[in-house]
Image: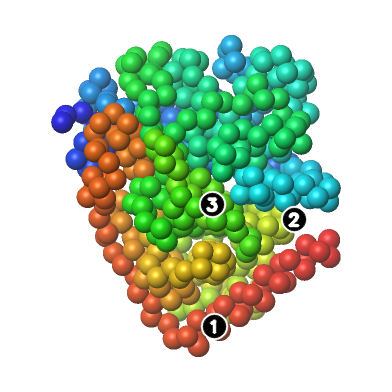
Amino acid sequence: MSGFLLSIDQGTTGSTALLLSPDGRVLGRANHEFPQHFPRSGWVEHDLEEIWESVAAAVTEAVDKTGVAPSECLGIGITNQRETTVLWDRNTGIAVHKAIVWQDRRTADRCKELKDAGKEPLFRERTGLVLDPYLAGTKLEWLLDHVDGARERAEKGELAFGTIDSWLVYRLSGGKAHVTDASNASRTLLYDIARQRWDEELAAELRVPMALLPEVRSCSEVYAHTSGVPGVPDGIPIAGMAGDQQAALFGQTCFEVGDAKCTYGTGAFLLMNTGNEVVHSENGLLTTIAWRIGDETVYALEGSAFVAGAAVQWLRDGLGLISSSSEVEAKAREVEEAGDVVFVPALAGLGAPHWDPHARGLIYGLTRDTTAAHLARATLEGVAFQIVDLVAAMQADAGRPITRLRVDGGAARNDLLMQFESDMLGVTIDRPQNVETTALGAAYLAGMAVGVFDGLDSVVDAYRIERSFEPQMTQGEREGHLERWRDAIRRARSEMEIK
């Protein structure tokens, strides 16, 4: 079969377009970053037009430099930063406010209010989620309450809500489709993951009109066709969709119960396939829909660390210790160890399993001997330590050990980070040839919908391991590192409580 699949990976700091051949080869890619907006401390926003420009630029560049004809596109898959919340005019497609990003903490007090009112068990039972500002529901409520006229217009049916996937399908289809998929719907605090429908009681708790919500579809089907998109022919099927972490789980071919992956991007996200069973966490994790294909729904346990690659960006942009993110490994290798320096990268609060939106970052153990290299190494180690906490919680919830972990995302290219992660976990880490498995997952889902791939077996055939990392530390060395990390976590949280 000739032609190609186009995957659009709309992330937190940039948009990537990836072109995949019918036999699973990556033909080309392009990435375009876009600005982040921080109107107040703890607030993070995106301009939707800047996102659209980055998507269009990435698609155009990927197609141009690969030399394929746009008309040969067989289908489009979409994956996205999940909880980022958009509210737009149904007629014009124009957002009524900047998108509120998943990292944004402005609704922390509202989440506490709901918890104090005893509402968290209800939300947790039906959605698999905790009440945290990370998720989309309270962000949408905030927009309805703080944008002039938004609630009245929403009740009249003039506005539409969606996560970035939903908004992209709307734009790509020329405003003809207002849909989302089950994996993204499961991140809103509004979707009953067992009954697989929007929940009217939860929507009423957050005062969200049901008319705002998109139609929920599977992760692999034709949702709409392109219409009026510059550089893209009309009539291309938009055929695959999943939230970024679920798409990565799919792209990593974690199709068996117990398979797990961790994506190291702006944040770090650990997911384990739990099959057709909804496993509710008792250890601070989330339960989520991994994907729905046809009539089958696969669920996952998830642990989220809000800051991973973003910590390296902070070293670059905030402290000026490196001039590019790619330099961090070389800088960290200038020293053999972090010199007892521990960095808790709670720059946007702490996610699972702590769920502390008020926590703040902490660098502990500084002395006159501390150098930029020690800080660089401590930053990488801090990212890895967060995953250790997530793995411990996940193993307890799942009742099974994680013996191998598949990794992806930009920071997974960092050999020092991956080796330290293997040492701290005491497990083998497998890194694939293509660490952009988020984009691959979306392409695979689209390819299955349009007949490029026959099913899961053909997806597995395309997967290749590039390198495996084996643990090299002794148990005593590992425990020494972990004890310093636990002490630093306690101190980071006590600082929050004092304030």
Q: Nearer the viewer, mark 3 or mark 1?
A: 3
- Residue at 34 percent across and 23 percent down: it is 237
* Residue 241, placed above or below residue 425: above
Q: Tags 3 and 1 in contact by the CB under 8 Å rule?
A: no
Label 3, secondary structure: give it. Answer: loop
* Residue 147, placed above or below residue 10: above
> Which comes sooner in the sequence, label 2 or label 1?
2
Measure the C-alpha gap from mark 2 to mark 1: 28 Å
The quadrant in which the N terminus is found is: top left
Label 1, secondary structure: give it. Answer: helix
Amino acid type indicated by mark 1: Glu
- Looking at the image, which is closer to me, 475 or 35? 475
Give coordinates of residue 251: x percent, y percent.
Answer: 35, 47
- Residue at 69 percent across and 31 percent down: it is 200
Circle on res. 278: 3
Amino acid type indicated by mark 2: His
